[in-house]
Image (spheres, helix red, strand yellow):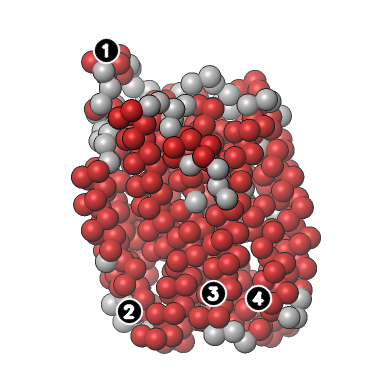
Amino acid sequence: MIDKTASPQGIAATTGDAAAQTRTMLWLLLIVYIFNFLDRQIVNILAEPIKTHLGLSDTQLGLLAGPAFAFFYALLGIPIARYADRQGTNRVRLIAAALAVWSAMTAVCGLAQNFVQLLLARIGVGVGEAGCTPAAHSLISDSVAPEKRSSAIAFYGMGVPIGSLLGLMIGGIVNDLYGWRVALMLVGAPGLLLALVVLVFLHEPRHSRNPEAAATAAAAVPLSTRAALREIFSSRAFVYILIASSVVAFLGYGKALWTISFFIRSHGLSTTEAGLSMAVVLGLAGVLGTWLGGKMADKYGARDKRHLLTFPAYGMAVAAPMLFLGYYMEDWRIAVALLIVPTVLNLAYYGPAYGCVQGLVEPRARALAASIMLFGQNLIGLGLGPFLFGVLSDALQPVAGQESVRWVLYGAAWLGLIPAYFFWRASLRLTAEMKSG
């Protein structure tokens, strides 16, 4: 059971109205991020029926799940983050507008009649989602104490596994009952209502500061983009975290799509069976891993800043051989069971990594730092992961046949040692480079 220190009540650093606003902010941002990943990842469980209905190749399928979304997400993320870092920007309105755009475009995906139309709609989803997380991380970092930052960002980050879980469950069940088009429209439409809720109930902390603090913030000289980039990349710890997180995303997004196809092709599961099975792995185990990573970082990082990243580093090293065994097993039930612990360990990085990034730069560059992380994770991870996994699967089919996806996943399991190494290298720099605020 999640204890109070990991909940919004425990994370909020103040009492009274300010604490209530912080709790409301954390819960609403979590719900927004759930919709973010629900709309982004539902394509994974719908991949096989979309492929059959539209006559797509694995390479085209990988393109839809990866580059079509990620390129525009990454391209627009940095300028939007610079806008979010400006003192006069209302980050709440920015998040609400982004939510409305990506929700509408997800529903439009369900109307696509061919590959090109679906490709353009997926691009629209990426354009909308580019405005969410950098602004959200900046809001969170302005609202909670530094010693609770990893837990707060991890709480927000639980939207990744929860959204993925709901996408797998809803997508699989609705597809089997009504088809993939209805599934996409069903998950997209509610986001438009949520955008209105965000505007009404979420408040921009920049507008609620006392007059003296507001005047000080307004008088602060904004960093130029060049100066902000110079500060961010002067941190070697940031560079190591960026590399590690990008590789985690490359492997994670690739496995998220193709593990489902693996269970359908190699184990003969239906979309509902595959969706529910992977919901346990990517959803429930992912929630536990994301929460546990933030909890461990705050607890042991308070004693020694190096330990902010100890759990992700060692956890990913332990996860690699367990993932390999999971993909090797012929009984799908054993395979699913063996994927649970590695998923917990692989998703423990989110709160510690992004929490460290927010602590390695000054407040005027926080949204930009988060956007650079997302740039790497989405361009390299989401942009190349599903796509290259699909290319490799097509290339291996003459040799491996129906098992080509399994062979690709074998290699992906062992590549998890790369981010483990870079998280460890980053941890050695944190004591010298972390800022106090």
Kind of residue at disc 3: Leu
Mark linked to residue 212: 1
Q: Residue 140, image x and y in percent?
A: 41, 35
The residue nearer to you, when weighing 145 against 225, is 145
Question: Of callouts 4 and 3, which one flags the residue occurring earlier in the amino acid sequence?
Answer: 3
Sequence-earlier tag: 1 or 2: 2
Whether residue 340 is visible: yes
Q: Is residue 418 visible?
A: no
Viewer-side label of 3, 2: 3
User: Which comes before the other along the chain, label 1 or label 3?
Assistant: 1
* Residue density around tag 1, few if under 14, some if 14–19, many if 20 or more, within 10 Å: few
Q: Residues within 10 Å of mark 4 (few under 14, many from 20)?
A: many
Query: What amino acid type is highlighted by mark number 2?
Result: Val
Disc 4 and disc 2: Cα gap in Å? Answer: 28 Å
Work out how far the residue at label 3 is from the one at label 2, CA to CA, in angstroms: 19 Å
Q: Position of residue 270 (x, y in %)?
A: 54, 85
Badge 2 density bin: few <14, some 14–19, many ≥20, Cα 10 Å? some
Q: Of residues 133 and 275, which is closer to you in this image?
A: 275
For marks 1 and 4, the one nearer the N-term is 1
Please, what is the three-letter code of the amino acid marked with disc 1? Glu
Tag 3's secondary structure?
helix
Which residue is depicted at the point 41% across and 49% down? 30
Question: According to the image, label 4 marks what residue?
Answer: 405
Q: Earlier in the sequence, mark 3 or mark 2?
A: 2
